[in-house]
Amino acid sequence: MNEKDFNIEAELSHGSGDSSLNEQKIGSKKSTFDSKTNYLVAERSGSVVNFNFSNPHLPWYKRIIDGFREAETPEVDTTGMTAEQMYNAKLASAPMSESIPTYTLSLMAIGGSIGSGLFLGSGNDLASGGPGSVIIGFFITGVMLFFMMQSLGETAIRFPVQGSFAVHTIRLVDDSWGFAMSWNYILLWLVSFPLELTAAAIILGYWKGDNNGATNVNPAAWVSLFWFFLSAVGFCGPKVYATLESLFSIIKIITIIGFCIFGIVCTAGGGPTHHYFGTHYWWDPGSFVNGAKGTVNVFINSAFAMSGIELAVLAATESKDTHLSLPRVVKQTFWRILLFYIVSLTICFCLVPYTDPNLGTSSDGKASPFVLACINAGVSGLPSLINVVILLSALSVGNASVFASSRTIAAIANAGGAPKILGYIDKCGRPLVGIAITVAFGLIGFIVACPAYNPAFTWMQALSSQASFFTWGSISLNHIMQRIAMKKQGRTLKEQYYNSPFGIWGSVISLAITLAILGLQVWIAIFPIGSEPSAANFFEVWLSLPIVLVFFIGHKLWYRNKPVNPATVDLVTGARIKTGEEIAIDEMVHAEENANKSALTVLKNIYRFWC
């Protein structure tokens, strides 16, 4: 809508009686206006609602104040709807900002959640499992996530609702399981926020040997600085979050690509010492240690390192034209996993043996295999640069924690799984109460001032150790149930803007791998590497399981609900599906492409599949 159209429509809505909200029909679109301020609140086209959260006619300082007021939700015509359809219509009409630029989604998809799990956690995996175990663990987890992301893309594009996959589970699988998975995801990020604040403060300890005054202060001072900065970003809104996250992503992408080039040169003997590393460390001291347990143990950190891979889809609900941008976002998962995890770690382990005494000895950059690779190659200055990137990565994940937890809190509240006040969203698209809760939870990071803080953070980390696997498994299950429901109700895949290229079997494979990994984690939890079986060791790995069961069983006993019936589940209300005309045009385009078997067409099809 251009400025001229806006002014015309605003004038049409002026002076229309005592009602504060007025509706005008213009073409096929239905617009809702606030007559008190004369600006567009929402514009509905079909079943999709687009919101305008700003009032250009107010002075800047009044716009700031006005922005904190609750966003208006347009009235939905529920005539003839069932209770389920009215519920889905309400969720679909929840106010969401569309201020996140589309191009930032690609950056977030490629480098968004790369953090201390890759740069630091991989060092512990290398020491306990060897380079071969790390690559196998990350590869299997990566395959599972690649299939999962295709499934998530299809479901999220069809049902573009606030909270994305957390709400999809309620709609497609089971209300109680969706409730449990929503709070599982909320706890994952609530815990991550103080953990990342603490990690960032501890990472600064890398420079203690330089007699730097900044490292001699209490770490709590740095926690306070980081907490204030990330809290301010959270309250500034989704556009500021996306801009900062894009900057972090660019830095991480450039760093990893540069490290890969640097690693190849040094491995081949082109470093300052001209020492030829080759693949020597892969066979001496070796590729594996601690047998099968060493490999299975890698899955815990691989989940931590790749957690947040689904965040780009969660953020896409606050971007325009998600049905056009999301397919590219989910396809880029392949390149991210291949380059930033598999390739970079393979090169890194050519420069660092698993017997390096520095691995796993500290929580700062001294234990990072990427830093140790630069040290072993004899390059001065570069280890400090890598440690700066590790610090920024920790802040990046902390920034994502505020975004993810606050959005999920608001979504579950609007879905009826939490007090209504938690779903408060202002005119700038900010879930203010959710942000406030996350920010308050981040104050736990100040426990770093206590010398004996390690046990507390060990148990906090245990809360999220398996939470990501539960989330990913549920996403795959959502897609399986969606496809089953479509088949039972006779709906065609042609009506969807995006279909997973691997179909329902991609989700089945992803879910099977997830369940297999969870099963193997039980073995490691009962019989950990290097220690006797104990309840403490078990719950350090599996503390998230009893929490999920408490939420699920408690909700099920309270509401006595039944799992969703695929034959009757609502697949239309609030869904983004193609019209008959759009389907006919797509069929014509596909027919022309099939008739044209040129090499250029084949290359285009390959590019579309992977990119």
Image (cartoon, rainbow, N blue to C red):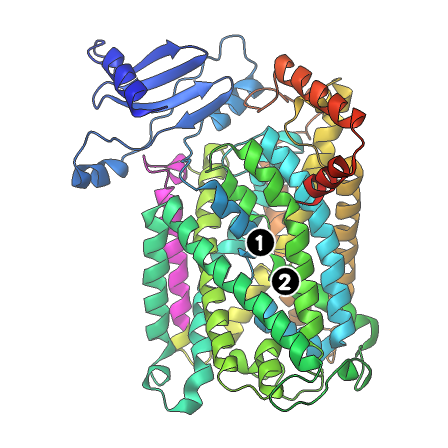
Q: Is residue 46 left or right of residue 222?
A: right
The magenta stretch spans residue 566: no
For image coordinates 35% across by 43% down, the residue present is 432
The answer to whether marks 1 and 2 mark residues whose Cβ atoms lie closer than 8 Å is yes
Q: Main secondary structure of the magenta part?
A: helix
| Secondary element type, mark 1 | helix
The relative height of residue 511 versus residue 199 in the rendered view (above or below) is above
Provide residue 272's location: percent of width, then percent of height: 60, 88
Name the kind of residue labelled 1 in the image. Answer: Ile
Disc 2: which residue: 340
Quadrant showing the C terminus: top right
Query: How far from the left and from the top, in percent, is residue 271?
Result: 63, 85
Check residue 218 in the rendering and tell me which mark sits there, or answer none: none
For image coordinates 58% across by 89% down, the residue present is 378
Q: Quadrant of the N terminus?
A: top left
In this rendered view, identify the residue nearer to me: 321 or 455: 321
Q: Could you tell me how far apart the alpha carbons at marks 1 and 2 are, in whole angstroms?
A: 9 Å
Q: Which residues are magenta?
A: 420-447
Q: Residue at x 38, y 25 (%)?
A: 73
Disc number for residue 110? 1
Quadrant assignment, res 208: bottom left
Binning the other alpha carbons within 10 Å of mark 1 as few (below 14), some (14 to 19) or many (20 upward) gives many
Q: Residues within 10 Å of mark 2 (few under 14, many from 20)?
A: some
Residue 440 colored magenta?
Answer: yes
Whole-percent x, y for residue 590 in the image: 73, 24
Name above or below for residue 584 compared with residue 60.
Answer: above
Tell me which amino acid carries mark 2.
Phe
- In the rendered image, residue 414, in percent from the top left (x then y), is placed at 46, 33
Q: Secondary structure at mark 2?
A: helix
